[in-house]
Image: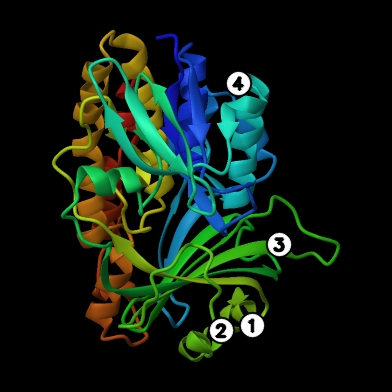
Amino acid sequence: MNDPVIIVGGGICGLTLALSLHELAVPCRVYESAPAFKRLGVGINLLPHAMRELAGLGLQPALAARAVETREMSYYNRFGQFIFSEPRGRFAGYPWPQLSIHRGELHQVLVDAVVERLGQDAIVMGHRCVGVEQDEGAAVARFVDQAGRALPAVRGPAVLACDGIHSAVRRQLNPHEGPPAYQGINMWRGVSRSKPFLSGATMVQAGWLDVGKMVIYPISPGVDADGLQAINWVAEIQSPRHVMQDWNLAGNIEDIYPTYAAWRFPWLDVAAMIRAHEVLLEYPMVDRDPLPQWTAGRVTLVGDAAHPMYPRGGNGAGQGILDARALARCLRTEADVAAALKAYEAERLPAANRVVLTNRSAPPDVILKVVHERSGDRPFARLEDLVSREELAAITDGYKQVAGFDKASLGAKP
């Protein structure tokens, strides 16, 4: 394969794919719609299965220097009562850490690695893909600039679409598919400066969707001169309200603060943390129904373009990273490009689609739902009267198996 493979999209998935292809001596080039990269988003969690792959690319030291190594996941009700906790990453015996990091820091590490290893011209900015074509010998991607003017088409052995939940390539391959499905849960994502809480490296989930749920975790590896950490938080509320824009739509604190005004736990004043936000973004919790196939000849979908999922379980970016690594292996080992893309689909589509469906029905935060419903949304006297630790552990262990980051699954993968 002499001509570069065309990667559409320079996000986390596209850049991981570029690094993976380069590692296996498969030439590629990334085409990104934005005119320049910006520090976007808020926090993101990298689970051991994703870190296994990123460590294989030699990125763990750079990521660890910018991240918090998560020690445990802890669950509480909205009254601050402890429900369940389990160690995470290396603290749970994995060879790889679980890292909590600002999305912008993760993205910058990937950009720097691509430029260093593949060269400055490996990423082409200002190219928005609007469609693909193909023949027996090659695939062609068509692009426009920021003003919608046509740019020269690009021809290569394959088009690998990493262009996200609003993928133009997915839309072309599935012209009758509707918009992303909103199931009634709206999210507000924020970053605040706060004193370290619990272990200083704890990831917390608290409450439940009916009455307000929070995901809270630190994303800065140290504290500032005032002894404060950058804390990422996500407020999730069952609500008919949603605005389908992008991950960087500014949110309004008045839409959420009344729900959490009384949330003052011994280890964290959640209400004060929300008021102190430096960033506040709004986005609905959406996904798409699983597709029966991702591949058409020399074109395939990767990451959120293939399987956008609810961000529950901290697993969306991780599945895209797994896609990228599997796709690179298939393109290296299969001489025929179309056969390689089908081999990738056969490996990854069933696994990713299971995660999409599990995130709808039985994600690990169902622990909170169980306690919320059995307690009648009231403080409990004894948790053991509601649920056993064994039942709670079975929920999280089952999700790890579905998502592919239980120890047995990781140890068996190439």
Real-space Cα distance between discs 1 and 4? Answer: 43 Å
Mark 4 residue type: Leu
Real-space Cα distance between discs 3 and 4? Answer: 35 Å
Badge 3 or badge 1: first in the primary sequence: 3
- Residue 126 is situated, as x and y percent measured from the top left of the image, at 56, 44
**Mark 2 — residue?**
253
Circles 3 and 4, Cβ within 8 Å, touching? The answer is: no
**Mark 3 — residue?**
229
Badge 1 or badge 4: first in the primary sequence: 4
In the image, residue 177 sits, relative to residue 322, either above or below, namely below
**Mark 4 — residue?**
118
Depth check: give the residue in front, 153 or 360.
153
Circles 2 and 1, Cβ within 8 Å, touching? The answer is: yes
- Say which residue appears at 63% left-offset and 66% top-offset: 197
Identify the element where label 2 is drawn.
helix
Badge 2 or badge 1: first in the primary sequence: 2
